[in-house]
């Protein structure tokens, strides 16, 4: 009985297998390392392919390194720490903070940095945190003097804990 080697198509299906085959052809043509990220839709798993055309002792080979990136991708999608910098802009403030609080992933902290805003920003944030009992995840940090946007960012970064930090500006929604 002849042994049949699996193909990219037999492993990943026609669509993804075809993309891997095209990347392989590109690696052979260019002698460059070609990387390709694929999502296997049926299992929702992510893979990164690094395809390289190499020569060893005068013989040509394809070196295909496949790394599963599913967990890494999922970690990137989780919000570990959210920074907010407020400086005299409360137009969308409540909507922004409500959106952050409504995240289905709950293992994050939100640091709201107030850079001496002259409007009701502090009051809005304090009331929001108190009413929703978010004191374990949402924190208001206040500067004594106005130091500018970069200082707010720096303060948030210095106080942030966790693997990831996401910066959300006062006008983001």
Image (spheres, grey):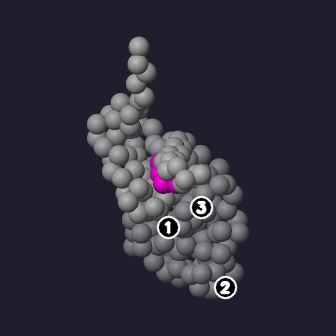
Q: Tell whether label 2 touches label 1 (CB within 8 Å).
A: no
Q: Please give the residue where the numbered disc 1 appears in the rendered image.
A: 168
- Measure the C-alpha gap from mark 2 to mark 3: 24 Å
Q: Nearer the viewer, mark 1 or mark 3?
A: 3
Q: In terms of sequence position, does the residue under pointer 2 or pointer 3 come before the other?
A: 2
Most foreground residue, 120 or 159: 159
Tell me the tag on residue 145: 2
Count neighbours of disc 2 (C-alpha within 10 A) and say few if under 14, some if 14 to 19, many if 20 or more: few
Q: Nearer the viewer, mark 1 or mark 2?
A: 1
Give coordinates of residue 69: x percent, y percent.
52, 45
Q: Quadrant of the C terminus?
A: bottom left
Q: In terms of sequence position, does the residue under pointer 1 or pointer 2 come before the other?
A: 2
Count neighbours of disc 3 (C-alpha within 10 A) and say few if under 14, some if 14 to 19, many if 20 or more: some
Q: Secondary structure at mark 1?
A: strand
- Tell me what residue is drawn at x 41 percent, y 56 percent: 28
Q: Tell whether label 3 touches label 1 (CB within 8 Å).
A: no
Instruction: Please tell me whether the stretch drawn in magenta is mainly helix, strand or loop.
Output: strand
For this orientation, the residue located farthest to the top is 1
Q: Which residues are magenta?
A: 49-54
Most foreground residue, 107 or 116: 107
Most foreground residue, 105 or 124: 105
Give coordinates of residue 112: x percent, y percent.
58, 66
Q: Secondary structure at mark 2?
A: loop
Tell me the tag on residue 165: 3
Q: Is residue 128 shown above or below 63?
A: below
């Amino acid at each position: 009985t002849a042994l049949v080697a699996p193909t990219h198509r037999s492993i990943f299906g026609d669509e993804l297998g075809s993309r891997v085959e095209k990347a392989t052809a590109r690696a052979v043509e260019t002698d460059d390392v070609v990387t390709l990220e694929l999502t296997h839709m049926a299992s929702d798993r992510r893979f990164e392919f690094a395809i390289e055309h190499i020569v060893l002792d005068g013989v040509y080979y394809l070196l295909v390194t496949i790394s599963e990136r599913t967990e890494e991708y999922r970690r990137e999608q989780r919000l570990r720490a959210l920074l907010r910098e407020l400086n005299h802009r409360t137009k969308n403030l409540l909507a922004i903070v409500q959106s952050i609080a409504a995240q289905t992933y709950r293992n994050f902290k939100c640091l709201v940095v107030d850079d001496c805003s002259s409007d009701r920003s502090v009051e809005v944030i304090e009331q929001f945190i108190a009413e929703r009992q978010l004191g374990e995840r949402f924190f208001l940090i206040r500067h004594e003097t106005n130091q500018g946007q970069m200082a707010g960012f720096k303060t948030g970064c210095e106080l942030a804990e966790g693997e990831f930090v996401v910066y959300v500006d006062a006008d983001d929604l």
